[in-house]
């Protein structure tokens, strides 16, 4: 049990692939896209709709709601 928990521990630093290293412009683009509703079919939802920073990156709902108002079978982590 202890060893399994250890292997799921968050790394001390964010790992980046050698062929796609971190840059400030890429981070800025990612942040911009994360909050841009243009990525959704109806242009009304961004990643942050379900992964809201002020709700611990969740949506506060028991099940996430996407384009289909009947909702998704999963909770947004
Ligand atoms: C309609 C709500 C919704 C939107 C919009 C959404 N997500 Fe999610 N997200 C979810 C749900 C629900 C899960 C859980 C899926 C699962 O458990 O298989 C999830 C899972 C994830 C995970 C996996 C987290 C983990 O711990 O494994 C990541 C990463 C993620 N989303 C990023 C994004 C990004 C990036 C966007 C925008 C491009 C986005 N999400 C948009 C609902 C949403």
Image: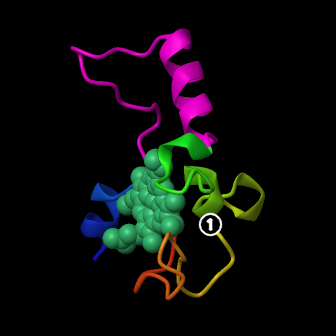
Whether residue 16 sits left or right of residue 47 in the image: it is: left
Identified at 71% across, 53% down, the residue is: 53
Q: Magenta stretch containing residue 35, yes or no?
A: yes
Quick one: which residue is furthest to the left in this view?
19
Q: Nearer the viewer, residue 3 or 23?
A: 23
- The correct choice, above or below, for 52 with respect to 2 in the image is above
SS for callout 1: loop
- The correct choice, above or below, for 34 with respect to 49 in the image is above
Q: Nearer the viewer, residue 4 or 26?
A: 26
Q: Position of residue 7 (x, y in %)?
A: 28, 56
Residue at mark 1: C-beta within 8 A of ligand 1: no
- Report which quarter residue 44 is drawn in: bottom right
- Report which quarter residue 32 is drawn in: top right
Neighbor class of circle 1 (other Cα within 10 Å; few <14, some 14-19, many 20+) is some
Whether residue 8 sits left or right of residue 45 in the image: it is: left
- The correct choice, above or below, for 34 with respect to 26 in the image is below
- Report which quarter residue 5 is drawn in: bottom left
Residue linked to disc 1: 58
Q: Position of residue 62 (x, y in %)?
A: 59, 87
Identified at 26% across, 67% down, the residue is: 4
Magenta stretch bounds: 10-36
Identified at 64% across, 59% down, the residue is: 49
Instruction: Look at the image and tell me in which quarter the N terminus lies.
Output: bottom left
Q: Position of residue 35 (x, y in %)?
A: 64, 41
Residue 29 seen in this snapshot: yes
Quick one: which residue is furthest to the front in this view?
42
Q: Quarter for ligand 1?
A: bottom left
């Amino acid at each position: 049990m202890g060893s399994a928990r250890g292997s799921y521990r968050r790394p001390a630093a964010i790992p980046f692939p050698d062929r796609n290293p971190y840059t400030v412009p890429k981070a800025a683009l990612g942040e911009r896209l994360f909050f841009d509703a243009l990525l959704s079919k109806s242009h009304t939802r961004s990643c942050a709709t379900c992964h809201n920073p002020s709700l611990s990156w969740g949506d506060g709902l028991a099940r996430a709601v996407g384009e289909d108002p009947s909702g998704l079978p999963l909770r947004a982590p």
